Image (cartoon, helix red, strand yellow):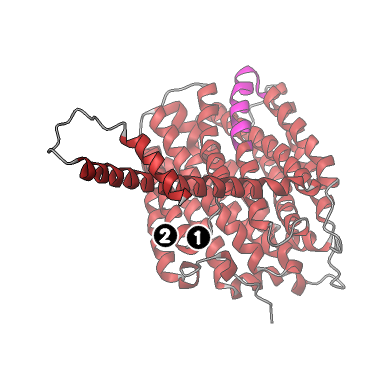
Amino acid sequence: MQRRQRATSRGVRIARLIPMNVKLMPLCPCLQERVFSGISRFFGKIYDAFSAEFESCRCSSVRSMATALGVLRQQAVRRYLGSTAFAAIGINICITALFKQVYDITGDPFSIGLLGLAQFVPGLVLAIPSGYIADRFDRRRVTAGFLLLRLLSIAVLIWFTNSGSTAVSLLVLVAIGIGVADALISPSRRAILPLIVSTDDLPRVIALWTATFTSSAIIGPALAGFLYSVDPSIAYAAAGGSALLSVPLTLSIRYLPGVAPVADEGRPSVRLALQGLRFIRRSPIVLAAISLDLFAVLFGGAVALIPVVASDRLGVGDVAYGWLRAAPGVGAAAMAVVLAIRPVSRRVGPTLLVVVAVFGVGTVVFGLTRSYVVAFIALVVLSAADMVSMFIRGAIVPLATPPDQLGRVTAVEGVFIGASNELGAFESGLAARWFGVPWAIAGGGIATIVIAGAFAIGFPALRKIDRFDDVEVEVPD
């Protein structure tokens, strides 16, 4: 009874907003009262339904945000994300400045491709041993140790810049050193995550990790563009300082109680080192998830040619170049926040395929436009799509992989990712020399769309994943 009275009261308040100077048919007082009572109840029901739906959505969003941020109460998670942020900011500053510097020296987009190839080759060569090292030794110490190797490479870049040298061959050697460090850092760092959080918290922490990583991809390039315009050596010094701050945070991460920091597998052997590769070959879902990223970003590697697009097609300077280089981070970070609040929970497989196709569309637009604003928006969109892909892949791989093999599987995955980034940079530079910059980028985007369709047909196991709970750990024979 009280509910009906409240609804009637609300409806009366709303009904009063209706113009009452409209001439109605003459009604008797009793019938007129019934008409207006019915109108009041009608609007009251609408008001109640709308309010209930609004409160439901608001409470759901608040609960999702609380759940996403609740994992930050864990000290290990905070230190892991902090170390990731400093390391990612440092390498983004370094790579942004390095690509710009080599293009300023040579004026040839192919030189950027050579740097990408130099970064990729160490990852390919070290894929098997780096994964075995991640599983055999304490992943925190491995990560911190090779962060120091990255720091040494940055120190060489500072010396190179201050010496006034224009020897591109030396920059290629430095890129190889960075590639070696990254090849050994990546599997160890990524394999730490399942050791510090529960399986239930893993998707949320992965979303926060991607938000941290991509926020760094905004801060790093934007800062690099500004510092590079002052002096390249200052940009490299900032990169080195950021990498150095990551080391103590990495070493201070604590694992969950009862988790062994080192896997005890007996004497080292080639068979043990190759287990990650064999596991991926036998797992259709893991193979599909990481190879889709390989082929999509291999052909859609527009980011590598941003220095050329900024200079030759858009005609902008160093600071605007830095912001254009940061545009992928803007889109990725915005999407990462969305995923932290409302992560993908249904139609996981189809969503992965769709966002890869969207990535291709954004790449085509970026390649063909001459507008700075359109280019910026295209990079934001394609990177937001790539973030969803990264989130889904980042959850599928650890959920489907036995913990004692995660380092080796992650190392092989790192080769796929490295191929899609560094080898993609080489492919983009080579294609730009043959076909010109616009169609080198746009053609890669078209190929990415075709690849998404091909994977939808060729890998039904991936396409049919509905929830992450459908992904089970595949125990090796």
Q: Using the rendered view, name the quadrant where residue 248 is placed.
A: top right
Q: Amino acid at mark 2?
A: Ile
Residue span colored magenta: 216-232
Residue 62 in the image, given as x and y percentages of width and height: 59, 45
Residue occupied by mark 2: 451
At a point 47% along the width and 32% down the height, the residue shown is 308
Q: Position of residue 336 (x, y in %)?
A: 57, 45
Q: Would you say residue 217 sits in the magenta stretch?
A: yes
Which residue is identified by label 1?
A: 292
Q: Earlier in the sequence, mark 1 or mark 2?
A: 1
Picture mark count? 2
Q: Nearer the viewer, residue 153 or 223?
A: 223
- Density class for disc 2 (Cα within 10 Å; few <14, some 14-19, many ≥20) is many
Label 1 secondary element = helix
User: Magenta span has 26?
Assistant: no
Determine whether 102 is above or below 5 in the image.
above
> Residue visible at 55% across and 28% down?
322
User: Mark 1 near mark 2, Cβ–Cβ under 8 Å?
Assistant: yes
Asked whether 259 or 304 is in front, the reply is 259
Q: Is residue 440 visible?
A: no
Task: Using residue 226 as the reference point, say whether residue 56 is left or right of it.
Answer: left
Q: Is residue 351 above or below residue 230?
A: below
Q: Amino acid at mark 1?
A: Leu
Q: Main secondary structure of the magenta part?
A: helix
